[in-house]
Image (cartoon, grey):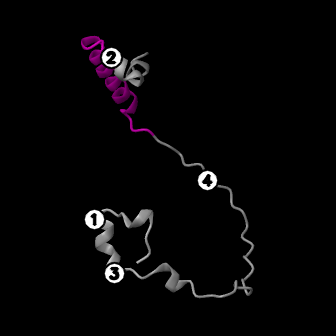
């Protein structure tokens, strides 16, 4: 078994080790491969921009979440000190 970091593995990794072979057993070439195939030319294709359609009530739902967040900030003003994104979210 090849080791890393002095062989200190988690129990999960240590349990897998018996079923794995050494990586060095797979790397058997003594010289680099020289018969590499040339890559194929692939024409570039423009990516299509997906059309995003909102559900009919999406704006109303978003507003409901904003109002709920605003109520949470009003009821618990100290909450924004630990959650600055919430303060940004409740701005109209």
Secondary structure at badge 3 equals: helix
Q: At 32% across and 21% down in the image, what residue appears?
A: 69
Secondary structure at badge 4 equals: loop
Disc with the residue nearer the chain's start (3 vs 1):
1
Q: Residues within 10 Å of mark 3 (few under 14, many from 20)?
A: few
Query: Is 70 on the left-hand or right-hand side of 36?
Result: left
Give residue 11's mark. 1
Relative depth, front residue between 60 and 28:
28
Give the Cα separation between the discs numbered 4 and 3.
Answer: 45 Å
Give residue 19's mark. 3
Query: Is 72 on the left-hand or right-hand side of 83?
Result: left
The quarter of the picture where residue 19 lies is bottom left
Secondary structure at badge 2 equals: helix
Disc with the residue nearer the chain's start (4 vs 2):
4
Disc with the residue nearer the chain's start (4 vs 3):
3
Which of discs 4 and 2 lies nearer the camera? The answer is 2
Q: Is residue 56 magenta?
A: yes
Give, as a single range, the part of the protein colored magenta.
Answer: 54-79
The quarter of the picture where residue 30 lies is bottom right
Relative depth, front residue between 17 and 49:
17
Q: Residues within 10 Å of mark 4 (few under 14, many from 20)?
A: few
Relative depth, front residue between 81 and 29:
29
Q: At 35% across and 22% down in the image, what residue appears?
A: 82
Give residue 70's mark. 2
Which of discs 3 and 1 lies nearer the camera? The answer is 1
Can you identify the residue that label 4 sits on?
Answer: 48
């Amino acid at each position: 078994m090849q080791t890393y970091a002095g062989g200190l593995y988690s129990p999960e990794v240590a349990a897998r080790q018996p079923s794995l072979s050494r990586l060095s057993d797979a790397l058997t070439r003594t010289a680099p491969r020289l018969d590499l195939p040339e890559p194929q030319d692939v024409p570039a294709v423009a990516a299509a921009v997906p059309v995003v359609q909102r559900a009919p009530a999406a704006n109303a739902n978003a507003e409901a979440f904003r109002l709920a967040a605003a109520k949470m900030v009003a009821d618990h003003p100290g909450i924004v000190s630990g959650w600055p994104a919430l303060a940004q979210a409740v701005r109209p």
